[in-house]
Amino acid sequence: MRWSGQALDADDGALPGLERAGLVRSVQTPEFEGITFHEVLCKSALNKMPEASTLPFNFTVNAFRGCSHACRYCFARPSHEYLDLDAGRDFDSQVVVKTNVAAVLRKELARKSWKREPVALGTNTDPYQRAEGRYRLMPGIIRALTESGTPFSILTKGTLLRRDLPLLKMAATQVDVGIGVSLAINDPVLQKQIEPGTPSPRARLEMIRAITDAGFSCNVMVAPVIPFLTDSSQHLDGLFAALADAGATGVTVFPMHLRGSTRGWFLNWLAEEHPALIRRYRELYGRGAYVTPEYKSWLKKRVEPLVERHGLAGPSQHRELESLPVERELVGAGAALTLF
């Protein structure tokens, strides 16, 4: 393999955490400049959700830890600290790859105790981030789920999903398959600043069209809405119009949460790029992770008529944001939810 010559000893002070994750080797390649892939052998693939969860699934699968999408607001950033890596640049550039995840998943799904409950993919980091183009883990995961009779859903910003649409169409003849796309920023300049590693808005709109052309419903996560940057009527109206034109069948909408070390990472960027907004953010978020109830109510009133105008209401279900602990886990089994 041509990557063999790019293997590293990776004795960089982060090894204790990575060794806990089953590190086999660390790899760099010119095709992914600035990114190190840490290949690990995982012991389990299915993640059980907490008993208190009110989400429409109890199990998730994540093939990666860390994400080259590098979204400034990503709620999953603190999870990198378990590996003795930081939640900022390390999260963006030190990507853990569970190379045996499909094989381990197949074994777990073969257990007599497995009840074929719905499984969500893309709940922590994106299953179709750029690394998937190299490692091709998703086809094995999809086949394992399908052959075991397990329904599943996918949430992604990655246009690599288009590669697997034929496989997903075949899977949908045997199990329920839900596909959701995340697209919250329709301004390509702002998108490159806040989500520098993600496909462009146009590319994701084209993916939504490809998904619906393949016969799937496609709910879109218009989240997070970023206060004072993407919450204007002009931006939201333009985005919803583009989504409807692309064939989206429903939207999920909620304002940005800033938990743990994600808060500092985002606010540092905001202070550099939009210093005039810092005072407003301090008023809006205080010392917590959530916007004020007043802002949430204001956003709801702004969004509802736009969602109706563009026919994106879908079978709505309203729940309080505070009861939903994981942002990327809000779309399951293809359901269309509008959340405030």
Image (tube, rainbow, N blue to C red):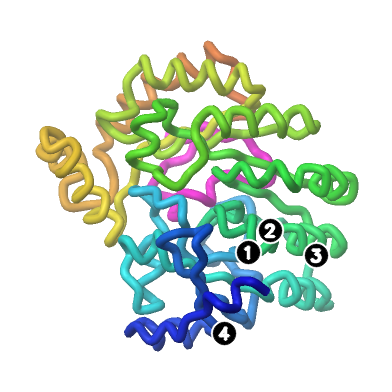
- Residue furthest out toward the top: 309
User: Which residue has dot 1 on it?
Assistant: 61
- The amino acid sitting under disc 2 is Val
Residue 316: x, y in percent?
A: 58, 30
Residue 225 placement: quadrant: top left
User: Which residue has dot 3 on it?
Assistant: 144
Q: Secondary structure at mark 4?
A: strand
Residue interval drawn in magenta = 317-340
- The answer to whether residue 124 shows anywhere in this view is no
**Magenta highlight: main SS:** loop
Give the residue displayed 75% in from the left and 75% down from the top. Answer: 103
Query: Looking at the image, is mark 1 or mark 2 earlier in the sequence?
Result: 1
Q: Secondary structure at mark 3?
A: helix
Q: Nearer the viewer, mark 1 or mark 4?
A: 4
Query: Looking at the image, is mark 3 or mark 4 earlier in the sequence?
Result: 4
- The amino acid sitting under disc 4 is Val
